[in-house]
Amino acid sequence: MLEVSSARAGYGAINVLWDVSLDIAAGEVTTIVGPNGAGKTTLLRAIMGLVPLERGQITFDGAPLAGVPTWDMAQRGIAMVPEGRMIFRDMSIEENLMLGAFAKTRRAGAKSQLEEVYALFPLLKERRALPAGTLSGGQAQMLALGRGLMSSPQLMLIDEPSLGLAPVMVQEVFAILDRVKAAGRTIVLVEQNTNMALRLADQVYLMQGGKVTFAARAKDVNVDELHDMYFAR
């Protein structure tokens, strides 16, 4: 579904990604793990067009994404749930969700999609009229995930969903991600919690220093060996 081929990208004179290549299969969860500064978030931003490619190619369903504006990605079936949630705190919970269906091709089905999101996150429905700033960290992550689902994406890019959450909320967020996967969504998940990520994943990539240094099917990965590579032991 998504193919990244020899991608190089960065910020001005600072290059971050060095010839990164990976394949994302439809209907699977692909997890990207690695230490801070490995280039994981930059890779997601490059896919979304937030960071321009210096070299290489990114294709989605066979069509190149180079030059496609970020605001057109939702219309093409790609949604990103960014690190740090980035919700609009002064807007209501429902208003935040409806922003996820801004693409013209998604607006007609927004109401039915909203009910699907509320079925997945009943707490959001209960509090839909309240400002998003009243939510806890875990609840705000649910809102960010729900907003991403509002465009009914074929591909979801999810960046560090467990960041800063209490262990009980991490468990709840990953249970929701498991339900999203079961519904047939294709997910690229960047996550520091390797144990939780591996339980959910079908494919695993390890990034270090802006490069992919390891790739394997999740069922074949030994967590201890992955951690040895992760921490360069």
Image (cartoon, helix red, strand yellow):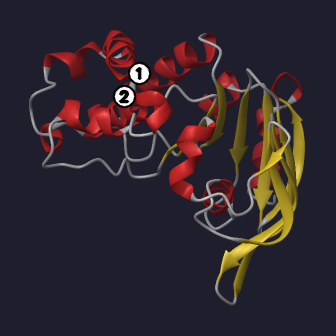
**Residue appearing at x 55%, y 56% in the figure:** 70
Give the alpha-carbon distance from disc 2 to disc 1, as whole Å.
5 Å
Q: Eyeballing the image, is 208 above or below 169? A: below
Residue that sits furthest to the left in the current view: 130
Q: Is residue 199 above or below residue 156?
A: above
Residue 143, image quadrant: top left
Secondary structure type for disc 1: helix
Q: Viewed as shown, does residue 44 lie left or right of 8?
A: left
Q: Is residue 62 above or below residue 47?
A: above
Residue 43 percent coordinates (x, y): 69, 58
At 46% from the left edge and 29% from the top edge, which residue is drawn?
Answer: 106
Q: Please tell me whether residue 6 is drawn above or below residue 11 in the rendered image.
A: above
Numbered tag placed on residue 172 in the rendering: 1
User: For the C terminus, which image quadrant?
Assistant: bottom right
Corner quadrant of residue 216: top right
Instruction: Classify residue 145 by image quadrant.
Output: top left
| On-image quarter of the N terminus | top right
Out of 140 and 35, give the one closest to the viewer. Answer: 140
Q: Residue at x 47, y 19 (%)?
A: 176
- Depth check, front residue: 13 or 91: 91
Q: Pointer 2 and pointer 1: residues touching (CB < 8 Å)?
A: yes
Q: What percent of the width, then of the height, locates residue 81? A: 48, 43
Task: Kindly tell me whether residue 138 is visible in this rendering.
Answer: no
Q: Amino acid at mark 2?
A: Met
Is residue 58 toward the left or the right of residue 109 in the image?
A: right
Which residue corresponds to mark 2?
169
Residue 182: percent from the left, percent from the top?
62, 11
- Left or right: 115 as drawn, with respect to 216: left
